[in-house]
Amino acid sequence: MEARRPGRRLRETLRRASVLPIRYGLSSELIRRRLSAMSAFLHRLEVVPTIAVTAVNLDLHPEIVPSLQDFDLAIHGHQHVAYSVKSPEQQAGDLDAALSTFRHYGISPLGFRAPYLRANGSTLDLLRSRGLLYDSSGSWLAIARGSRLNRRIARSAEARYGRLDSHVSLPQLSNLVELPVALPDDEILVDGLGIRRPSTLTRIYREMVHGCAETGSMLVVQVHPERFHLFADSVKEMVRFAADLGAWNAPLSGLAQWMRRNDNGQHWPQGHRFALAVTGDLDAVCLSDFVGRLGRLRR
């Protein structure tokens, strides 16, 4: 959860900007179609996904709100800026602005995921003070050490998200349930390693699921909705494989509520062996949303 230098963040954002036209359109129409397709696809698998939304997207594009109604929603900041580079006062201002925007649209989020998965101790204290139930800003490497892709995935993950835990993670309770993201996510797989072949993505997901099933922990998978179509077949195979191994699939709010009620990270409901959550972050809606972001990073 340590901060990255502004220059490094700017270079990363510029590099990511080179592929933005593939991911985003000139208006909100493309992301609305992809949100609807993602929701319908996962509904057929009886999966309710969690989408962490950067709240400024709702301010700028209120027309996307109906497309989010079938998702479990969390806060992804008001502006898409790492919380680890903000002072406690700046973090509070950003979170309060996000909460205000969510309330304006009748949304009552239970949790938070920091932009770029970058938070710190001040962030966690702030989330507790605002009464949020869970945080999903941490991350861990959920690929087996013996995997032939382990070293490449680890290098890409550390370059993108910083130092990682390498052990299986269980929720922690301290008035705030911790639900860390399992890596690799779609950013690492597609942008970092250039992997798009469904058979390879499926194999990686099966390895991740198998490891969590063996330890009885949880797998919080992250796929950004604007590129979910690239992962749909592999996610379907992952969900089915996980069900065969005894997974309980639930949105992040469901995981957090279960943990708060039971105060026990060793057992899952109805005898399930482990837990699975499919999540994604809505960082932006269209290409124009990145103009202001680049300007802020240059300051």
Image (cartoon, rainbow, N blue to C red):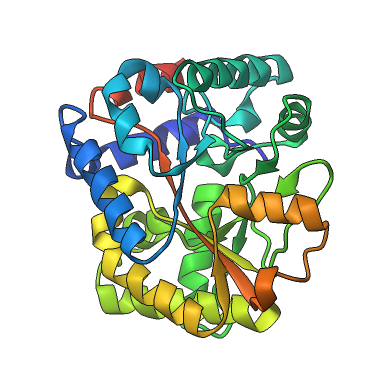
Q: Residue at x 62, y 27 (%)?
A: 85
For the residue pair 228 and 63, the one nearer the viewer reads as 63
In the rendered structure, the answer to whether residue 133 lies left or right of residue 157 reads right
For the residue pair 253 and 210, the one nearer the viewer reads as 253
The single residue placed furthest to the front in the displayed view is 270
Q: Is residue 209 visible?
A: yes
Q: Residue at x 47, y 34 (%)?
A: 9
Q: Position of residue 88 (x, y in %)?
A: 72, 20
Q: Position of residue 288 (x, y in %)?
A: 24, 22
246 to 105, vertically: above or below: below
In the rendered structure, the answer to whether residue 129 lies left or right of residue 238 reads right
For the residue pair 66 and 134, the one nearer the viewer reads as 66
Q: Residue at x 62, y 37 (%)?
A: 110
For the residue pair 289 and 56, the one nearer the viewer reads as 56
Q: Which corner quadrant of the image does residue 84 belong to?
A: top right
Q: Position of residue 244 (x, y in %)?
A: 49, 84
Q: Residue at x 70, y 39 (%)?
A: 133
- Considering the image in quadrants, where does the N terminus appear? top right
Q: Is residue 204 visible?
A: no
Q: Position of residue 296 (x, y in %)?
A: 43, 17
Q: Which corner quadrant of the image does residue 230 belong to?
A: bottom left
Number of callouts in the render? 0
